[in-house]
Amino acid sequence: MKRIPLILAVVILGGGSAYWITRPSPYNSGAPLVSNGEPVHLLEGLETEALSDGWLHRTFFRIKPTDYRVTEEDGTRVLRCTTDNSASILARDTKISVAKLPMLSWRWKVTQPIESDVDEASEDGDDHPVRLYLRFSNEDGETQGAEIIWSNEKYAPGDYKIIGSFYHYVANGLSENTQQWHNQTVDLGQLYSDIGGTGTATLETLGFFCDSDNTGSRSDGLFGDVTLSARSN
């Protein structure tokens, strides 16, 4: 676990698994993604060579950043994240009502999984080839973070990995499921309740967090069609 002071943001950010964040949000870009209730497509308009407005790439002190690149596979625009003993978060500043757009759906594929003997349930083993970072706030200004992860070897879909008090929801994983695309959907309203969130939730950050720095390993994965939408009637 890394506790990294971001002086300009006046926060303490812990990489790997746990976050101690004070307001204002370290992902406040001044240009949040908003919605009038229509579906939101997160990767639409993203450029990684020169980051689009509302996107931030948060790096950790003395840790090599993850390589995030918009590319194409089978004619479809996707985001590739490649690590080599590295870690960083590519995040979109958002202001999305969880009540209006609770369903988060996406595709992902792991092409190089984390290979390590370190227990992924521990802080030292808390690396994942693909994961999504979420930060919620409520009407009282309280914040709650969580991640959606690809398990390396021990968790089943639907499990929660908890390190300290930080929740990681397991959506998929294991080596036998690599090299192929998987469609995923998570109800953020349910997730927010599961992690102890109270009040009316706003999703204020949605990001990608691919890392291998704790285990000193490598990984590679892709994301596509990341969408926030309403529940089906």
Image (cartoon, helix red, strand yellow):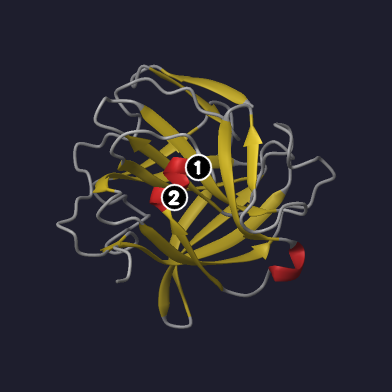
Q: Report the number of numbered marks.
A: 2
Separation of marks 2 and 1 at Cα, in angstroms: 6 Å
- Which amino acid type corresponds to the residue marked 2 in the rendered image? Gln
Furthest toward the front, the residue is 233
Q: In which quarter of the image is residue 142?
A: top left
Q: Is residue 140 above or below residue 224?
A: above
Write down the residue under mark 2. 190
178 versus 4 height, above or below: below
Left or right for 100, reference 150 = left
Quarter of the C terminus within the rendering: bottom left
Is 118 on the left-hand or right-hand side of 61?
A: right
Q: Residue at x 64, y 50 (%)?
A: 159
Q: Report x, y in % for residue 91.
A: 39, 45
Name the residue located 37 percent from the left edge and 29 percent from the top edge: 143
Q: Which residue lies furthest to the right in this view?
A: 117
Q: Which of 156 and 95 is in front in this view?
A: 156
Q: Name which residue lies at 64% across and 36% down.
A: 162
**Quadrant location, the N terminus:** top right
Mark 1 surroundings within 10 Å by alpha-carbon count, few (fewer than 14), some (14 through 19), many (20 or more): few
Q: Which of 110 and 216 is in front in this view?
A: 110
Q: What element carries label 2?
A: helix
Image: 231 above or below 28: below
Label 1 near label 2: C-beta < 8 Å?
yes
Q: What residue type is labelled 1?
A: Asp
Q: What residue sits right under mark 1 in the picture?
A: 194
Secondary structure under the numbered disc 1 in the rendered image: helix
83 or 120: nearer the eye? 120
Q: Which image quadrant for residue 135?
A: top left
Q: Which residue is drawn at 68% across and 39% down?
A: 126
Q: Nearest the camera: 93 or 142?
A: 142
